[in-house]
Amino acid sequence: MSFNVTIRPSGHQFQPKPEETVLQGALNNGFGLPYGCRNGACGSCKGKILGGEVDYGKYSPAVLSVAEKAQGMALFCCAKPLSDLEIEVREVGAIKDIQVKMLPSRVQSIERPADDVVVISLKLPANERLQYLAGQYIEFVLRDGKRRSYSMANAPHDDAFVQLHIRHLPGGHFTDHVFSKMKERDILRFEGPLGSFFLREESDKPIVFIASGTGFAPIKAVIESMLYRGIKRPMTLYWGGRRPKDIYMMDLCKTWEAAAPHIKFIPVVSDALPEDNWSGRTGFVHQAVVDDFPDLSGHQVYACGAPVVINSAKRDLVAKCQLPDEEFYADSFTTEADLAKVV
């Protein structure tokens, strides 16, 4: 049985097919809702149920607490209608006209900017082009049917190859293969573009970017797209890592800062060793933002990294720095360990 779903405040309506989640039903009917992992592990798709009932599905309790459920919140990538629904969620209009494709690709090159990070360039078939928004991601479809998600690090105008930044997670099914067996000319199949992390161009507010580790990849794409298109909103990039080597494209960021007066770059290191000779900012990357921006009421924040970084940043920036909740945009990089918490 199909049920009617009404989105507030827009009033848009759609009917998911039986067994479709609210998110998939919305996307299939041309309505863009925010989302990230699509597995109940990141919380990007969280919204409020104003009326009706849902099957909440499987999700990580870390991203949807008992208290939030009591307040009417749900993860729309997991929730399935059990009745007509009225939901409150901000729509994302820019993604609705972008075609999601399943494509083969060939590994063009593999570079190692750090001992545990590779930059992979993928070549698409000659007659294919991937239309996407800077900040979106693709999902590799592995031979066993499992999927692995990685954000594109190149801006759409620079689309000769699809560039990905992949960190090695020892014991990780896919990353162990990437670091030990993958070679140039290997064929990989992926679906994309996916996700709702991209620049909100209707705003002219100053921007704070927060990246941890390879969370730099989608932010790199967004910044390079802005530079190419001449968008000169003031922006401050905070990039955090455990050691300086984790900020593996520091020279590129310094080049941006030197060439564009509206860009400021602040690397932050949490666990520097004596041999690193680190004299820059230390501690958690989101805490550096809290220290520097006591009033973010007139800003937007775009954050990318592990779920613990994203959740801590949103909590503290909203509570301590007056950042409007709706001006925090995130891409939470979930791992196999994060997905294992989905119950």
Image (spheres, helix red, strand yellow):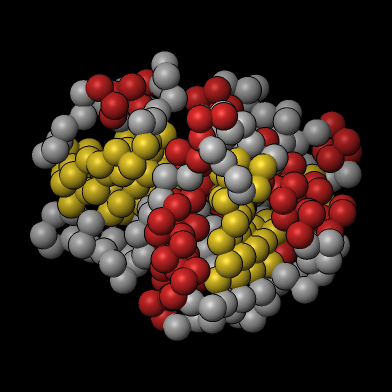
Q: Which of 77 and 121 is in front in this view?
A: 121
Instruction: Quadrant for residue 133, please give it.
Output: bottom left
Where residue 281 appears, as percent x and y from the top left, is 65, 48
From the viewer's side, name the closer residue of 321 and 161: 321
Does 11 appear above or below 309?
below
Q: Residue furthest toward the top?
A: 171
Q: Which residue is drawn at 55% across and 23% down?
A: 337
Within the image, what quadrant is residue 235 found in?
A: bottom right
**Figure check: 161 above or below 1:** below
- Res. 237 visible in picture: yes
Instruction: Residue at 71% x, 36% y: name it.
Output: 63
Query: Which corner quadrant holds the C terminus?
Result: top right
Up-down relation of residue 328 to residue 272 (above or below)? below
| Left or right, residue 11 beside residue 261 | right
Residue 326 coordinates in the image, percent (x, y):
74, 63
**Is any part of residue 304 visible from this angle?**
no
Q: Depth check: give the residue in front, 248 or 14.
A: 248
Q: Which of 36 and 81 is in front in this view?
A: 36
